[in-house]
Image (cartoon, rainbow, N blue to C red):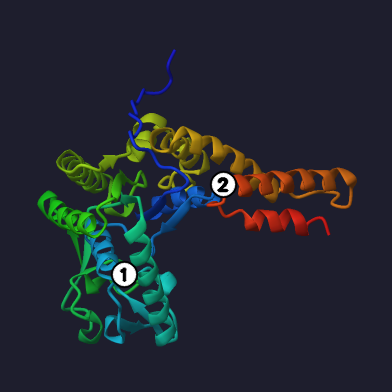
Amino acid sequence: MDFQLPIQLQPLQQPVTYRDKLLLAGSCFTEHIGDKLQELKFNVLQNPNGILFDPASVAAALVSYVQNRQYTVNDLFQLNEVWQSWQHHSRFSNINQQECLAAINASQQRAHQFLKQAQWLVITLGTSFSYRLTEQSPAEIRKGNVAVANCHRAPGGWFNKHLMTIEEINSVLDNCIHQLFHFNPSLKIIFTVSPVRHVRDGVVDNNRSKARLIEVVHHLVNKFDRLYYFPAYELVIDVLRDYRFFDVDLVHPNYPATQFVLEKFMEYGVHPASRELAEEIRKLVIARKHKAFHPATEAHAKFLQAHLVKARELQEQYPFLSLQEEIEYFQGSKL
């Protein structure tokens, strides 16, 4: 008897390998997957602007990487004694204006260079709702922006909450994709829709929002070559389909759910040889996290030595990997 709805995942014809560069952009679910890939030593750059949720913000950020846009002090504003950017997550915010600007531009430069050489771009869209500054916001902080990527806990009256139409979403993403492919003709793009429920929008409006994203993404995948859809949303909402796979907030998928999605992503999008290598690296990662009750024992010394040998073997066999941290850990822990 089956206790889950079956879902057919057609593996990519040219799957991801360890030699590839992957840029991930979008919602917080992007970082769940990105962190796992990074832990497995894939060459990953994730969310150079920080977490982004709506198509307008994601597209604007990606275009800024293509153009290698450098921000100036005129793009920043000060709120609650902190300098911030409407286009960036609060992890870039700083009480020092120049330090805020330097961090933003360093991230822009890195994203530009990385995207130029990347084989893959993974875009995870979270919501169709976009926030726009209104005339009620102070003139000195509007900076000419219409849509904002992050509200930075500013007063709600400063913003207008706008549910983007299918035509609007299609327009911003279509334009963005054309620029991406012109900038990097070798780039391939995987779209996903985040399974995180935006309950502040209400259950009904959350479903309307997700439906618009799914409709546009499938339209674009059918229109462009080198565009693909990975059903992260469907895997959580329709296959797992149970609150035991969500965190205590009943909104964010929990560890078992994200692991399930990652396993399916590996099956769908990663080359079999790279999946085998990932399993070897996973064992090293687990070993590094191991906390010995009796670190001075000979048994623990043998444990460290065995994993040091394995890490060195993998590093020699796959010189494009970065296992130096693991090697240093297994060496240093013996002393």
Give whichever of discs 1 and 2 has the lower sequence position.
Answer: 1
* Disc 2 target residue: 318
Q: Is residue 30 above or below residue 70?
A: above
- The alpha-carbon separation of the residues under discs 1 and 2 comes to 43 Å
Give the image location of residue 78, x and y in percent. Answer: 34, 84
The image quadrant where one finds the N terminus is top left
Q: Which amino acid does label 2 sit on?
A: Tyr
Q: Is residue 83 above or below residue 225?
A: below
Q: What percent of the width, then of the height, locates residue 48? A: 38, 64
**Where on the picture, by quarter, is residue 131?**
bottom left
- Mark 1 vs 2: CB contact within 8 A: no
Among the 4 quarters of the image, the one containing residue 178: bottom left
Q: What element carries label 2?
A: loop
Looking at the image, residue 149 lies above or below residue 307: below
The dot on residue 151 is 1
Which of these two is toward me, 297 or 214?
Answer: 297
Q: Residue at x 69, y 45 (%)?
A: 287
Quarter of the picture containing the C terminus is: bottom right
Q: Looking at this rendering, what residue extends furthest in the top direction?
A: 1
User: What residue is drawn where x is 44% and y is 83%?
Assistant: 99
Crowd rating for badge 1 (residues with CA inside 10 Å; few <14, some 14–19, many 20+): many
Q: Where is residue 291 in the image (x, y as percent from the top left)?
A: 75, 50
Amino acid type shown at disc 1: Cys
